[in-house]
Image (cartoon, rainbow, N blue to C red):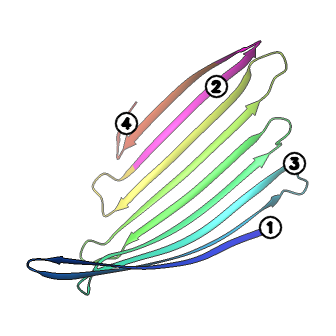
Amino acid sequence: MNLRGNISANYGQTTLETTTGKSRNPSFTHRYDLGTFGGLWDPRFGNYDADISYQEDIGKTNGVRNRDTDTLDYRLGFSLLPRKTPLTLFAQRITRDNELEPSTSRNRLDTYSLTWDLPLQRLPHLRFNLFRSDSRTTPSLTGTIRTQAASVDASQQLADTSVFTRYQYSELKSGTTPTT
């Protein structure tokens, strides 16, 4: 198991002078990141990578808060059988809260993907991909916006020529109305 991390802070100030007066716009952002990565039992079986991060961003104009957002990000990935037929799984959740009154809101984005490579001898290399993301903002009139995609890639090297083809199906649903 390996750990990684980061702590950062940034303060900035902009001063704007016009014929009607002077405005000061300070901002402060701080961020914390923590992650881990390593092998699953045996590196030939697979490996993992996981991260969590938090960021707060605050801004003011002439002492009045005009920006206040918190962002929390979780990410987890697995790569299984990396030498034979690599299977990669990925999941992420990003939650962003706008805490500025009176327009408080929360946006949550969930993303999932799966990729499976089949490096076949004397046949095209095949790759299968599945992807899904759900985005929801509260308060909202549209509900959850879902994006889904599935694709199959085939590639082959023939002497000095590379051949690639892809079939992809995508779907977007907003609330209860799907579009393809």
157 in magenta = yes
Residue 2's tag is 1
Magenta-colored segment: predominant secondary structure: strand
Residue beneath label 4, please? 178
Q: Which mark's residue is nearer the viewer, 3 or 1? A: 1
* Magenta stretch holds residue 159: yes
Q: Mark 4 or 2, which is nearer the eye?
A: 2
| Element on which disc 2 rests | strand
- The amino acid sitting under disc 3 is Phe
N-terminal-most mark, 3 or 2? 3
Q: Tell me the distance, in whole angstroms, between the alpha carbons under discs 3 and 1.
A: 17 Å
* Spatial separation of the CA atoms under disc 4 and disc 3: 39 Å
The foreground one among 28 and 39 is 28
Q: Residue at x 43, y 53 (%)?
A: 135
Position of 161 with respect to 104 (left or right) is right
46 displayed left or right of 138:
right
Q: Which residue is mark 2?
A: 153
Give the residue type that dot 1 points to. Asn
Q: Quadrant of residue 81?
A: top right
Which amino acid type corresponds to the residue marked 2 in the rendered image?
Asp
Magenta part of the chain: 145-163
**What kind of element bears circle 1?**
strand
Which numbered mark, 4 or 3, is in the foreground of this view?
3
User: What is the three-letter code of the residue carrying label 4?
Assistant: Pro
Circle 4 Cα neighbour tier, 10 Å, few/some/many (<14 / 14–19 / ≥20): few
Q: Position of residue 60 (x, y in %)?
A: 29, 81
Q: Secondary structure at mark 3?
A: loop
SS for callout 4: strand
Q: Earlier in the sequence, mark 1 or mark 2?
A: 1
For label 3, the residue is 45
Q: Are marks 1 and 4 in contact (CB under 8 Å)?
A: no
